[in-house]
Amino acid sequence: MPDRSRPVLSVEEALERILATVRMLESERVEILEATDRVLAEPVVADRDIPPLTNAAMDGYAVRGADVAEPSARLRVVGQVAAGHLGEARVEPGTAVRIMTGAPVPPGADTVVRFEDTRLDGEWVEVLKGYRTGRNVRPAGEDVRAGQEVLKPGEFLRPQEIGMLAAVGRTEVAVVRRPRVAILATGDEVVPPGEVAGPGQIRDANSYTVAAQVRRYGGVPLLLGAARDEEALVRQGIQEALVREADLIITSGGVSVGDFDLVKRVLAAEGEMRFWSLNMKPGRPLAFGVVGGIPLLGLPGNPVAAMISTALFARPAILKMQGFTDWPWPTVRARLAEPITRKDGRRHYLRVRLRKTEEGLEATLTGDQGSGILSSLVQADGLAVVPEEADHLPAGEMVEVLLLE
Ligand code: AMP
Ligand code: MG
């Protein structure tokens, strides 16, 4: 039975309202490896040139370009220099110094000839071909200049940025803090996975699905277990989330129009809450509000609805808290293997398996699309989006698929 007191919102409208209450968190200093996949919160400046000295790009001989312009030059080998050493030899006209990749080019030399282009004969080396001055020499600072800003605040730190932090001598760096996300299941029937589940009981899948998602999105999940359907217990769970300094609270269950749906009652008493009817399926009911200054997202209890709602609404909030400014979902386009009819005017997120064919990707439904069928998600590679206005899509139609990899 539809609840007429609830505003009907689109996914975009709901997300906009949620994000309007969410702010970027403060920064913290972490070891550089811990900064992987996080957002930088300070400028990073190079303390020195990289490379610090002009050096060889190849193993060979450091020479003077003027000596080797023509093929068959004969030079006397006067020393050698390896990477990590400064060497003592100087390259005077008519001489060469053996040099290894990365070793500093000795004074007097401006060119490196490769071993492959030489023939050694006692203390003499013959350079078989003519060389252009400057070949195989990497100038100091060609990668990074001392004083240069190599990374800017707001940048996402991928492995290559972590490498740059190391290269400029950083061991720690300021990044935006990870949000702590408290997760509270509700329902008299819900028991923890480690407990004996009686005939009328089910195990708490949602807390774990959501916690795993939170972790993927860069948050720190705080599992608060399942509260029975009693106002005092749900209130206690939310209080615990506040005591544990959650930045976001996610509940599951108890937001639809059922007799024991009390999350909404508790929340309406505790804070500022909105109960929405979203124009989507699965996941029509959603609660959102602020309790004790902390945003709270009340998910529906059905496992598929809970997971998809977390992906659509909690993910952007968790990313925004970490300093991200956009959160595109990896998407592909695929051809429907079968026709789809949905005449309720809602946006459907259908679980599909993807298969490569000669004509591109093909999407097949993973069976029963009920919002309680968790196995339909286990078998899915993605969520095919059926737009609100599409009431019939023939087989072969192209659809957008949100990847669940
Ligand atoms: P509710 O939104 O509380 O009416 O719950 C809707 C459906 O989801 C019911 O069949 C519940 O048993 C199921 N459900 C609620 N919470 C969980 C949970 N934590 N894990 C798995 N299923 C749940
Ligand atoms: Mg319930």
Image: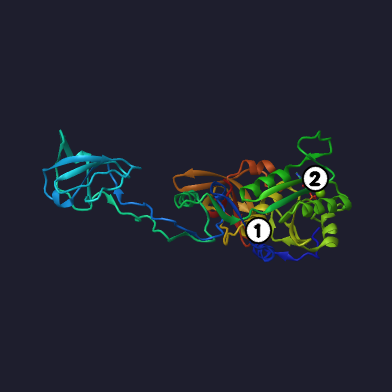
Position of the N terminus, as image quadrant, is bottom right
Q: How many marks on residues?
A: 2
- Packing grade of label 2 (10 A; few <14, some 14-19, many >=20) is many
Determine whether 76 is above or below 291 in the image. Answer: above
**Relative to 153, 391 lies left or right:** right
Q: Which residue corresponds to the image point at 69% horizontal and 46% vertical from the top-left?
A: 211
Q: Where is residue 202 in the image (x, y as percent from the top left)?
A: 79, 40
Amino acid type at mark 2: Ala
Q: Position of residue 95 (x, y in %)?
A: 16, 44
The residue wearing badge 2 is 226
Quadrant of the image occupied by residue 76: top left
Residue at mark 2: C-beta within 8 A of ligand 1 = yes
Residue 317 disc label: 1
**Relative to 149, 13 lies left or right:** right
Q: Position of residue 127 (x, y in %)?
A: 15, 42
Residue at mark 1: C-beta within 8 A of ligand 1 = no
Looking at this view, is 184 or 342 the one in front?
A: 184
Q: Where is residue 155 in the image (x, y as percent from the top left)?
A: 52, 58
Distance (Cα) linking label 1 and label 2: 23 Å
**Relative to 343, 331 lies left or right:** left
**Relative to 221, 83 lies left or right:** left
Q: Can residue 246 be seen at all in this image of the molecule?
A: yes
